[in-house]
Amino acid sequence: MRYLSLVLLALPSLAFAATELLNVSYDVSREFYKELNPAFVKYWKEKTGETVSIKQSHGGSSKQARSVVDGLPADVITMNRSPDIDILYERGKLIPRDWQARLPNESAPTASTSVFLVRKGNPKKIKDWNDLVKANVSVIIPNPKTSGNGKYSYLAAWGYVLKKGGSDAEAKAFVANLFKNVPVLDTGGRGATTTFAQREIGDVLLTFENEVTLIQEELGADKFEVVYPPLSILAENPVALVDKVVDKKKTRAVAQAYLDFHYSEQGQTIAVHHHLRPQVAAVAAKHQADFHAISLFKVEELFGSWANAEKTHFADGAIFDQIYQK
Amino acid sequence: MSKKTNVLPGFSLSLGYTLLYLSLIVLIPLSAALIKTTELSFSEFWHVVTAPRVMASYKLTFGASFIGASINAVFGLLTAWVLVRYDFFGKKFIDALVDLPFALPTAVAGIALTAVYAKNGWIGSFLEPNGIHVAFTPVGVVIALTFIGLPFVVRTVQPVLEDLESETEEAAASLGANRWQTFYKIIFPALLPALMTGFALAFARAIGEYGSVIFIAGNMPMVSEITPLIIITKLEQYDYTGATAVAVVMLLISFLLLLAINGLQWWSSRRNAEAIE
């Protein structure tokens, strides 16, 4: 009996020695986490003496979220849109409803924005959103029904009209004209990049600022130019720990520290390396020169909430479907 | 009815095993899909599966699959004929080539086909200036579905053709049949059931194909969206019931079509048997 209790006592500490976190993330955060994770492992080792290892899982956002709902034991989930984390509450009650209130800045340590990538020399002279609806311009945007990237571009175009003082009807007409210029709707952001860069289709690619820099680094800085529109959307990247999983795995403390690390000066600086806009004011101020000054609006500011934007714009039969069914 | 005794024992055991196996692998997942759709009322179900975008996708998916399978029926038969009836240098190599669409991940096939048919690709750069658009149009969908279906026809026709004795053709010729008569009266009826099986397999495979098509289709609503993409789109929106509703309709149409093809095949082989008697 005494031995048994000894064994039982030893078990949790054994589990403790091999703490492992699983971070389930979206597709294009790979490079960011390749740098952030080792930095956190080192930080945690120095602080507590404990060795933690972090496993990453990357894939299409909603596919990843669905896996977590279906039982993939993710300690933390890191996405590029809050609805992909909301689903953990809605479908599985894995997290509380108010998860966004648990960390600073609505649980979004980093953000990006939708910008334009054009061919060298900007032959079509694209400067702002209204240049995209001109008759001779061909625009590449991933499908807003299947891609978070596409949703942000769509909402940015809509917001552009509203911000100029336009009505919803004018915004709808503008977005309809914009999508008339879209010859291919890829299912994801990287697919759209391939269509634009490798297949040489389209005059302008709409994608995240951090993606654009990566494309230039990978495919040649001399082939493309980035155009920063004066106004765009703030694409926030929210993070959350998955309560049901961390409580079962007894990893809450380290998972919380991992998320907090995203907000630390070191974590924020790593985000800057990957061209993600830091959201902690002090760090953002320090790196102001690294990012183009664009006037940015939040989804909540113009569309109420993400849930609302989904319902009015992207649900079946909603506005995006309507503009294709005339 | 007299009880037929089989050479090999164990009919009930093997039938039981077959039923269990089919239930586990095919029927249980499919009935899960059916049960999921009962969350919708009939009018909701009807609304989801007859939405204009979904209707357009049925037309494209079934139309392009039919065209792709038909092309394969013609050229697959030709390929099988060449591989069985002639000996030439590199035959083994070509034989292996036929199976490649089976082994290749479909996404790789899709990306490769798009690269070739896009306006800066090997073939696309010749076609596009002449106004022929393949990549990012429904034509591209047909090409992808033809590519993935090729092995089915060749592999089903090949063994039948190998068993066909050339003596029957010689007999036909000696009885005064010309080459065309020999083909369509002697060879073709014997091949038809196998050809139809190959066609049905290629057709069924094409209906369900997703990976290779999404890269080359362009995925424009109402024009080049295939039904599997509609299903994926609904899943991306966490609309599980809507996705399964469309899937159930697809299953139903596919099942009816396959049933019809099987019926035709049965009819043609019976007619063939009668003709020989």
Image (spheres, rainbow, N blue to C red):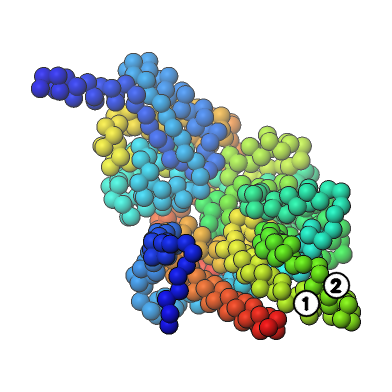
**Label 1's element?**
helix
Which marked residue is nearer to the observer: mark 1 or mark 2? 2
Residue density around tag 1, few if under 14, some if 14–19, many if 20 or more, within 10 Å: some
Q: Nearer the viewer, residue A255 or B82?
A: B82
- The percent position of residue B46, horizontal first and vertical second, equals 44, 78
The answer to which quarter of the image holds residue A244 is: top left
Calculate the distance from the C-alpha at mark 1 to the C-alpha at mark 2. 11 Å
The disc numbered 1 marks a residue on which chain? Answer: B
- The percent position of residue B120, horizontal first and vertical second, equals 81, 52
Q: Is residue A97 toward the left or the right of residue A278 in the image?
A: left
The numbered disc on residue B170 is 2
The three-letter code of the residue at mark 2 reads Glu
Q: Residue furthest left?
A: A1
The numbered disc on residue B186 is 1
- As drawn, B55 above or below B159: below
The three-letter code of the residue at mark 1 reads Ile
**Label 2's element?**
helix
The answer to which quarter of the image holds residue A201 is: bottom right
- As drawn, A184 above or below B245: above
Seen at 59% across and 71% down, the residue is B57
Seen at 41% across and 48% down, the residue is A67
- The percent position of residue A321, horizontal first and vertical second, equals 54, 69
The disc numbered 2 marks a residue on which chain? Answer: B
Q: Quadrant of the C terminus of chain B?
A: bottom right
Q: Are marks 1 and 2 in contact (CB under 8 Å)?
A: no
Q: Is residue B262 toward the left or the right of residue A259 in the image?
A: right
